[in-house]
Amino acid sequence: MKKLLKNAQVINEGSIITTDVLIQGDRIAKIATEIKDAEAEVIDLKGKFLMPGVVDDQVHFREPGLTHKGRIYTEARAAVAGGITSFMEMPNTKPQALTQDLLEDKYKIGANDSLANYSFFMGASNENIAEVLKTDPKRVAGVKIFMGSSTGNMLVDNKAVLNAIFSKCNMLIAVHCEDEETIRKNSAQMKAEYGEDLPIRFHPIIRNEEACYKSSSMAVELAKKHDTRLHILHISTAKETTLFRNDIPLKEKRITAEACIHHLWFDESSYDEKGTLIKWNPAVKSLQDKEGVWAALLDDRIDIIATDHAPHTLEEKENSYFKSPSGGPLVQHALVAMLEFYHQGIVSLDWIVNKMCHAPADCFQLKERGFIREGYYADLVVLDTDKSWTVAKDNILYDCGWSPFEGTEFKSSISKTFVNGNLVYDNGTFDESTRGMRLEFDR
């Protein structure tokens, strides 16, 4: 079946042009000013913006084993409603994806249940380097190393193991960087003074700049030593941004970095209102840190924007500080949140598309996605930048049923989302007759 998208304002590769787009099967067949095709279903976009689907390189969809928090089906459904057509999911599920067989089990769930295109990271631990090195770089997003305390026995703190992985792994390594020793010392000090009832505002003091920079700089040092393809996730401090370059094109970089929505939107002043709902690792930090991360995004030291979508139940989040888990749901609201910065005049639409679509595709060498090009997969999103709405319980699609953006009015809406040419989301209505595809990588 062909679909002809008429009168679209296409945001792609640094420009916005009014054009038609013909979809045939799962691909973009033609892009031209005036397309006529008697066999095609015509969808008149009436001047609305059309962009590539967002590629989110960091999500935690909680399946298998943690499905009371979220499932691949529900979270991917929320993602496509938010304009995310492809996601890369992290290995800290239950069981953790530390063997090739366990990794493939997740791909089977994705094939059965995900409305969005999917990939899953292989997890690294202190004991599984032989399994890590079996990972296929053409069919798996990357290898994930937790150089912090978020994930129990997935913490990789053995320097010999880190050296071995960085020296032998022939694919992208993505790292969560926080120094465990620093965090434990700070936690002990705070607990001794305040007990279990520690105010949430101390979270960025426990998980401070020192913890982040010490770990990030070590990762960069290892990558430079071994010429490793390194990607550092969710940068949260201004100091860390000094580790990255902007004097070469993204495709030539061996060391890349990302910023996440919550570190661009919130700062430590938000804890008074949001409390543990905005408890993340790494922590939301000072206004100066937020401004530093923004500055690095704007001058291309930081390459991409992601979500770190990590749902927990509201009951879990409303615990006291030490018992409340870190993480929150973001995929449904990430793109519209970034569009607020467009409405404020801070960034342009093509800048957002670059950081959320083009750059992730280039960073991960994603095959035939992330751009609106003839022959590429038809992963497309229609924006209505004039249709405001307010986040409320009755329109939140996450399994956990809450959002840190609840009560926020967004000026833009996601009208339609196409995944592999299928109109899976249309103004609040889902077509669940098809599933997303396993992502492939040109490596």
Image (cartoon, rainbow, N blue to C red):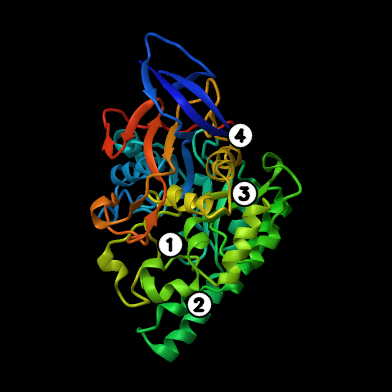
Specify whether 333 is left or right of 174.
left
Q: Determine which residue is flagged by label 3.
A: 303
Q: Amino acid at mark 4?
A: Glu
Q: Determine which residue is flagged by label 1.
A: 151
Q: Nearer the viewer, mark 3 or mark 2?
A: 3
Q: Amino acid at mark 3?
A: Asp
Report the residue at 72% width, 50% height from top.
246
Q: Determine which residue is flagged by label 4.
A: 13
Specify whether 24 is left or right of 352.
left
* Distance Cα–Cα, label 3 vs label 2: 27 Å
Give the vertical position of 34 relative to 413 (above or below): above
Q: Nearer the viewer, mark 1 or mark 4?
A: 4
In which quadrant of the rendered view does residue 393 lie?
A: bottom left
Q: Amino acid at mark 2?
A: Ile
Labels 3 & 1 near each other (Cβ < 8 A): no
Report the residue at 56% width, 76% height from top.
182
Q: Secondary structure at mark 1?
A: loop
* Distance Cα–Cα, label 2 vs label 4: 41 Å
Q: Which corner quadrant holds the N terminus?
A: top left
Specify whether 134 is left or right of 311.
right
Question: In the rendered image, is residue 390 in sight?
Answer: yes
